[in-house]
Image: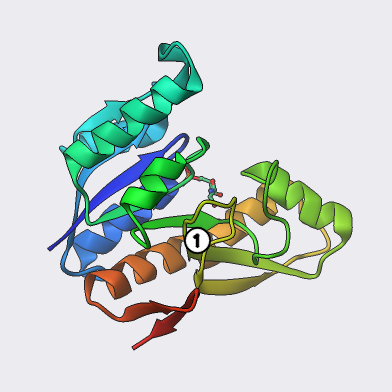
Amino acid sequence: MLKLVVCVSGGGTNLQAILDAIESGVITNAEVAAVVSNNANARALERAKQHGIPGILLRPGDYPDRAAFDRAFTEEMCRLAPDLIVLAGFLVRIPGEMVERFPDRIVNIHPSLIPSFCGVGYYGLKVHEKVLERGAKVTGATVHFVNEGMDEGPIIAQKAVEVQEDDTPQSLQKRVMEQAEWILLPQAIDDIANNRLRVEDGRVRHI
Ligand code: GRF
């Protein structure tokens, strides 16, 4: 049974997609042991509570400096001892020490086709604003392993979504979530839970 800890900062629709996929059997051999958030008001914490899953609040502002937060965050994650850490709309930088302790055991969902529209400053609605500003005709989502870079880890899977001429950032975000994110993340977790992925020379192979 793959033990998951899911990190969230906002609405938690990706967390909900994971919970629904476990309930429906789309994801097998996995369970969400805890949800960690930096935001006390995150709706995602409410979703966890409704499923009887412990919510843990870890806010950088509660610590004297970033190094102290990073240490506490890493120590808490080691205490939870997940097999896989899932970043589902988590807006806090992952400490390098945590990446080292959990090599190829942290995944992130990003709302674009990496390497487009990613990296510092590209998160949430901003990504879709930039896609529309650029006039891109296709966008999508990417699930990838997390390394020490920002959105630079080995890509697990991607799914393309058409940009429509009358799209707003909000309508595009909704379509990318519905048609890509909420499908890709559960599928990747199920693949990992059932040993269907291997990372070789920085690239992910499905076996
Ligand atoms: C999603 O668009 C995800 O791709 C990005 O942040 C957003 C989180 O949404 N990382 P939610 O909290 O899962 O609803």
Closer to us: 86 or 129: 86
Q: Position of residue 57 (x, y in %)?
A: 32, 24
Q: Is mark 1 within 8 Å of ligand 1?
A: yes
> Which quadrant of the rendered structure holds the N terminus?
bottom left
Q: Which residue is mark 1?
A: 181
Q: Residues within 10 Å of mark 1 (few under 14, many from 20)?
A: many
> Which quadrant of the rendered structure holds the C terminus?
bottom left
Residue 158 location, quadrant? bottom right
Residue at 19% over, 33% down: 54
Q: Is residue 59 visible?
A: no
Closer to us: 41 or 207: 207
Closer to us: 66 or 129: 66
Residue at 42% over, 84% down: 205
Q: Position of residue 155 (x, y in %)?
A: 52, 70
Q: Is residue 33 left or right of residue 91?
A: left
Q: Position of residue 8 (x, y in %)?
A: 41, 39
Secondary structure, mark 1, is: helix
Residue 30 location, quadrant? bottom left
Q: Is residue 141 visible?
A: yes
Residue at 33% over, 59% down: 105
**Which scheme is used to colour this image of the protein?**
rainbow
Residue at the limit of the structure toward the bottom, as seen here: 207
Q: What amino acid is labelled 1 in the image?
A: Glu
